[in-house]
Image (cartoon, coloured by chain):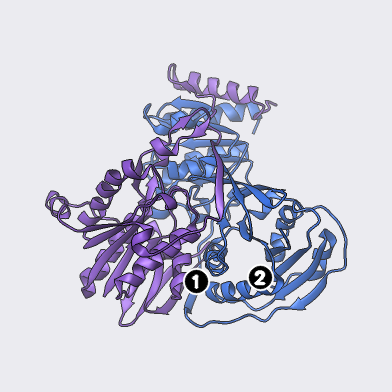
Amino acid sequence: MAMGVLVVGSIGDIGLVGLAQRFRGQDVHYLLTGQGDAAQLGRYGVSRVYQLTTGIDEYSFSETLTDLVNRGSYSIIITPVNRFYRTAAPMAAQRLSAPLLTDVIDVKPIDDELEVVLNSIGNRAQVTVKVTGRVLLMAPPARFKPSENPVNASIEPLQPKVVNVVKVVSTEGKAKGGARIEDAELIVAVGRGFRRREDLKLAFELAEVLGAEVGCSRPIAADLKWLSEDHWIGLSGRRVRPRLYIAIGISGQPQHLAGMMESRTVVVINNDPNAPFFRNCDYGVVEDLYSFIPALTKRLRDILKR
Amino acid sequence: MDVVVLVKLALDTGQLRVSEGKVDVESTPLKVSDIDRNAVEEAVRVRERVGGLVHVVSILKYGPVQRRLQEAEGLLREVLAMGADDAYLVADEALIGSDQLATAKVIASIIRRLGKYDLVIAGEATVDGYTGQVGPRVAAELGIPVVTYVRELRVEGSRVVAKRDLEDAVQTVEAPLPALVTVTREINTPRIPTLLQIRAAVRKPISKLTLADLGLTLKPTIKVESAVPMQVKRRGVVIREGTVDEKADRLVQALIQEGLLTPR
């Protein structure tokens, strides 16, 4: 299979070059969006950079990408995972008659075939698929680390193909809680077991003693709006993989579990002994959170001297 | 206004069956993908405001086809009871385990056969695959605009105005009809049908089709080798007995032993 690898993304998505390098002996090119320093990509063996400096909508981007892939005869196209690419990449894939595999963990080229390992079934299983021919891969850049292999990258500006079908009327920024939950090592997550917004301070106190970030289930962010959406962990929220995940008053619906499956140690605190989350925990405590969390926080203060 | 709503009969991941360390897809029950109920609700609301019809389109992705047919029909009756007018179900061995490229081609083919359509509504993603590909792919196949992650939708004459939920911003966009829209769970609260509506749904038409009926042949592009459940091995130590302080102490001791806490 003739292969050329095209990585797509901003300069912040450079981690994806690490995935591209697993296709040994292949040229790696980069469609760079935004103002990032294109020359920097040469350090990691990227031999050609197409730089697209104007921001365009997903529809136009998918057309631009389709044309570039056809022009360069790329067989492997790698993009980051976010709502922009979740919209643009499938459109490009359909035009290219190619499969698109999301949440990719690893790739193994074997002769004419490509074996791809990905998280699937609502993040409940690791699935291995075999592909022949052109394929688009979507992966979180932070999962990979490119190794250095300096070359001189040729840089050419890319003219977008702008298709005016969807008109943006306005854009307004979302309120942010300043949470960086995706990278957190320790997480205290809160759910509907909390009766009032003010009561969340119990969880925040616990998090402070541990040095943890506070996350939440869908109702707390989406319905009640007690916390901003950057705290929301789940299938449609953020995906996290901390060393310790403490779920307080969360029943454990599959959509929530999908967002925290990769946590190393899971602690569940709930007063309902039948909460489904207890079937997916390392340590569970059946207790009323209103009496248990203050007791736990006090105990931790004593031993951690904080 | 004729609205097409895409409904996935998804694997019920809360009831995932496992045998010999592999996911047993064939014996895992199906359910209407949660977000697709929001899509149906929105489609019915659009029809209630401006008139027209709501068609449901569904592709059976999990086998065995013969055994699943009745299960699929039962699930489609649930969304018909919510107010959709009729349903199209494509069930064909060649679609079992097929990729989204094929799914989108089949859906687009049915939509074209309907002749008249103004709006296509889908969920932002399904609860089993969660790739969110099919909506944008169908739009590309039909050559119509796509507006994803919509949490507020208005139909104004021959265009839609939508509020899109992006990671860091809410974007308001306009698109001409026909268009495809994918919705998030925040857009509405799906109605629970009354007993009367459930009874009435039994008489609504469900057309069952095969690829031959649609004149389609598909070439598979991917082959699923294996599916292994992730991280199902948890310790499962549940502390039920003792006073609040005793429980806190036992938990803290366990976390120290795991190396997650270091006493000072």
Q: Please tell me which residue lies in front, B260 or A129.
A: A129
> Percent from the top left, x then y, of residue B7?
35, 56
- Supply the letter of whichever chain is blue: A
Q: Please tell me which residue lies in front, A276 or B194.
A: B194
Residue depicted at 42% across the width and 46% down the height: A198
Note whether residue B219 is visible: yes
Mark nearest the camera among 1 and 2 is 2
Residue B16: name its quadrant: top left
What residue would you read off at disc 1? A172
Tell me, for residue B108, which label it has, or none. Answer: none
Chain under callout 1: A
- Supply the letter of whichever chain is purple: B
Do dots 1 and 2 share one subunit?
Answer: yes
Tell me, for residue A69, which label it has, or none. Answer: 2
Give the class, few, some or many, for how many residues have Cα within 10 Å of label 1's Cα (few <14, many ≥20).
few
Residue depicted at 57% across the width and 62% down the height: A98
